[in-house]
Image (cartoon, rainbow, N blue to C red):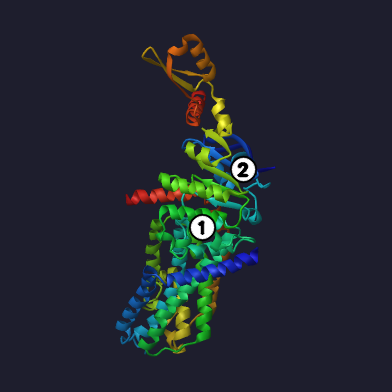
Amino acid sequence: MTTISVKAGLTRGRIELRQSFTNGADLWSHFFWPLLMLAVLYFMRDRAFGMSGFTLGALALPGILGMNAAFGLVSMSQQLTADREDGTLLRAKATPDGMRGYLIGKIISVAGGLIADLAIFLIPGLFLIDGLRIDAAALIWVLALGLVATLPAGAILGSVFTSPRSQGLLTLPILGLIAISGIFYPIAALPGWLQAVAQGFPFYWLGLGMRSALLPDAAAAVEIAGSWRHLETVAVLGAWAVTGLLLAPAVLRRMARKESGSRVAERRERALRRIG
Amino acid sequence: MSAVDVEDLRMRYGTADVLDGVTFQIRAGEVLALLGPNGAGKTTTIEILEGFRMRSGGRVEVLGADPAHAGERWRARVGIVLQSWRDHGKWRVRELLAHLASYYDDPWDVGELVAAVGLAGQAGQKIRTLSGGQRRRLDVAIGLVGRPEVLFLDEPTAAFDPQARREFHDLVRAAAGRTTILLTTHDLDEAEKLADRIVIVNGGRVIADGTSRELARLIAGEDEVRWTRDGHSFSTTTPDSTRFARELFLQYGEAVHELEVRRASLEQTYLTLVRQAEGTAAP
């Protein structure tokens, strides 16, 4: 039965991924951010950063890539909440081994969609920005570790927030974190205590990891301690991954246990009241 | 053998007893309606049987297992149709059925199932574009896709127009076959049409259990007799309308005209039972 549900989950992920690239609303969200970010890059491409010899555009492109990768956390959380509200999750619960299939499918569709979004941004970006040097191996390990660090955390947040509206609460602190994570402007220019806060979250480390994968080593001079700090990157992202993977199953189980038809109906009534 | 066995089921939220010792059985292959007014505890009962809700007390067995602790093997033998589903709106009808079928060992053939519920014309359509009635047909198809031994239907036709309701009843009767079905409804007519047996719940308690005929017989004094004599009309209610009519004729013979006897209907029975139960429950 386990192999059946793993196979079903893979199919599910593939179908969801296809759906998200074949309807207008989803296509818009796949292209809107990458295109907006490319526009931002376009205006930053010639501006030099101090005496470093690098343009702001070259420093920002990997950071933006890292930020987008970290957004898997947000989309995982949003999708879980939405699926709970419309009963998709309850359907999975009513199906033998359906929760396993659902989760595998969700991980594939969120990670797959994310990688597609990264490509939509990165490929045109490479043509736009000079001075990049691609280390494919580093790109892959940073991205892979980043996904393992952020997706379980997203699943946990998605279990905690009960409605898409309350998901809105999540956006503000995340935008704040992005602002202080050295995505658009090197973090070394920030006050020390803000640097400390940013270094507790995956946004900064994904950005740093991406810079290490896409910039020449000389660019590390701009970073904290003048180094790519790979060890620290692995340590912080790894800590997020381990914590997430340890907590997520229990949190998800708890959430799934509480799902029932009347709960889904209750939530719908609340939503309708808000509209009506 | 009982497919479903519920004994002294209790559910308490805070200080309120939603279920206060519910007991009933469903034989394998039987269609049973759990009938009662809104808030009687029907949905709570069915959710406990589905394994979606923990009970406060009592013993529950569905297909020989306690739903609160039954595993995925058990889950595969149970089909569920909830009051309303809005899930998987982006999926196409056939796509979703085929996907869900893939979780089961011996599912229905998807093409056959789609035709059986009358959705052959919509098989390639996105689910969110289905009409309300079509959506319910899909929900029933999903409930049946794994060839369940027990099917739970929670208020399946709430908010249906009469035409859609009749079509739905035909569908469930055709689908029933040898499946054990538990449906909840507050619609007496629906219970009478679909169920072999009716369990009436009110205030968290079973107040009657039997076939519709048995239930109607439970309540005495409900037959209504009307007649006219010497140009005046009369009416009365009596537990034994046959005997009343005989005595009426013995007494007045040919003076009696336009005799009309209305047997106790299940509706009257139901209303009387609920009223009585509420009378005894009141302090």
Kindly identify the amino acid type of the residue bearing the numbered disc 1: Leu
Q: Judge left or right: residue A273 versus residue B64.
A: left
Q: Which residue is drawn at 50% across and 54% down?
A: B139
| Camera-nearest residue between A124 and B148 | B148
| Camera-nearest residue between A130 and A12 | A12
Q: Residue at x 37, y 88 (%)?
A: A127
Q: In the rendered view, tell whether residue B110 sits above or below residue B215.
A: below
Residue B243 location, quadrant:
top right
Residue A215 location, quadrant:
bottom left
Residue for badge 2? B30
Furthest residue toward right:
B1
Q: Residue at x 40, y 66 (%)?
A: A174
Question: Residue A96: image x %, image y %?
Answer: 60, 58
Q: In the rendered view, tell whether residue B131 sits above or below residue B199.
A: below
Give the letter of the chain under mark 1: A
Disc 2 residue crowd, few under 14, some 14–19, many 20+, Cα 10 Å: many
| Camera-nearest residue between A64 and A110 | A110
Q: In the rendered view, tell whether residue A256 sits above or below residue B53.
A: below
**Numbered disc 2: secondary structure:** loop
Q: Residue at x 51, y 11 (%)?
A: B250
Kindly identify the amino acid type of the residue bearing the numbered disc 2: Glu
Residue for badge 1? A89
Question: Residue A133: image x %, image y %?
Answer: 45, 89
Q: Which mark's residue is nearer the viewer, 1 or 2?
A: 2
Q: In the rendered view, tell whether residue B62 sits above or below residue A175.
A: above
Furthest residue toward front:
B254
**Numbered disc 1: secondary structure:** helix
Cα separation between marks 1 and 2: 30 Å
